[in-house]
Image (cartoon, rainbow, N blue to C red):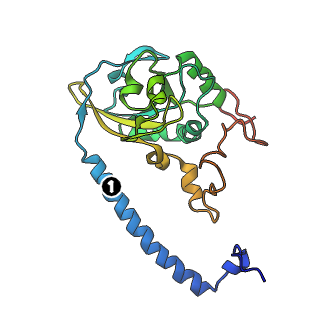
Amino acid sequence: MSTATMTPTAQDRAVSPKQWLDARLELLAKEKELRRQMDEVARLRRDLPWQRVEKNYAFNTSQGPQTLAELFEGRSQLMLYHFMFGPDWEQGCSGCSFLADHVDGATVHLAQRDVTWTAVSRAPLEKIQAFRQRMGWKFNWVSSAGSDFNFDYDVSFTPEEIAGGEVYYNYGRRRFPQSEGPGISVFYRDGAGQVFHTYSAYARGLDVLVGTYNYLDLAPKGRDEAGFEMPMAWVRHHDRYENTPKVSSCGCRE
C-alpha cells in the first residue's frame, strides 16, 4: 500500500461546530496580535525621518510640464507609484496593471485625507495616455522621460548596471532581469513649498496595495501560486484574460 502523502479532501477537513469555533478563536487571537503589530509598524513608518528633495524634477503631464511640487495638486501629501513602463515598451507591466486596477476607486477618498495619488513611468506621455485609455483607468499618470527621477528612486536601471549582474533595488544589491522595477514613493510639501521624501517601498512591500491579494488571503486556496515559476505568472492585463468582458475607453464593461 502506498505511503505517499494524500491531499486532504473537503470531507477530511470537516469538523463539528465546536471544533470549528475553537480553531477560529485560536486564529482570531493571532489575527489580533498581527493587527496590533501592523499598527505599530504604521506608527514607526510615520515616525521615519524625512529627506529634503533638492533636485528640480520635471514631468510631462496632460497639463504640460510640471514640477514635483506641482504634482501635489494643492495637497500636502503625494504618493507616486512607479509603474513599470520603459521608454521602448509597447505596453505597461501586467503586474503593475494588476495593482493599478485597484486605484481609481481609492483616489477620491485619498483626496479627502489630503493625499494625491499619481503614477509615473519613463515611457513617453503619448504611450502612457494610449495605454491608460485602453485599460479604462482615470487616475493621473505622468512621464518622467528625460529626468533622473526613476533612477534616483531606484526603480530604473541602466544597461550597464544590468550587464554588471546586480542593481540596487529594495535597499540592497540584487540581480534584476529588466530595466524597470515597481515601487511607491511618498512625499510631503510644507507651507513654504519645500518637498520632502518620507517613504518608499518596493517588491513585496507593495502587496498591501493589491486588494485582490487581500481577498485571496481569505479564501480556502489562498493565492494558489505555488505551482508557477514566479508568483504573479498568472496575472494578465484585465482585458487579456479569456472570457473576460472588454473595457471600453470610458471604463464601462462591454
Tally of numbered discs = 1
Horizontally, is 16 left or right of 140 in the view? right
Q: Residues within 10 Å of mark 1 (few under 14, many from 20)?
A: few
**Where's residue 26, x and y in %?**
47, 78
The residue that mark 1 highlights is 41
Horizontally, is 50 left or right of 246 in the view? left
Vertical position of residue 144 compared to residue 207: above or below: above
**Where's residue 29, x and y in %?**
43, 74
Front one among 187 and 151: 151
Of the 4 image quadrants, the one containing the N terminus is bottom right
Residue at 52% over, 39% down: 103
Q: Residue furthest left?
A: 192
Residue at 63% over, 23% down: 90
**Where's residue 144, x and y in %?**
44, 20
Residue type of the residue flagged with mark 1: Val
Horizontally, is 119 left or right of 253 in the view? left
Front one among 33 and 172: 172
Horizontally, is 135 left or right of 2 in the view? left
**Where's residue 177, x and y in %?**
53, 35
Vertical position of residue 204 compared to residue 103: above or below: below
Which quarter of the picture shows residue 66?
A: top left
Vertical position of residue 35 compared to residue 208: above or below: below
Whether residue 111 is visible, yes or no, is no
Front one among 174 and 184: 174
Q: Residue furthest front?
A: 164
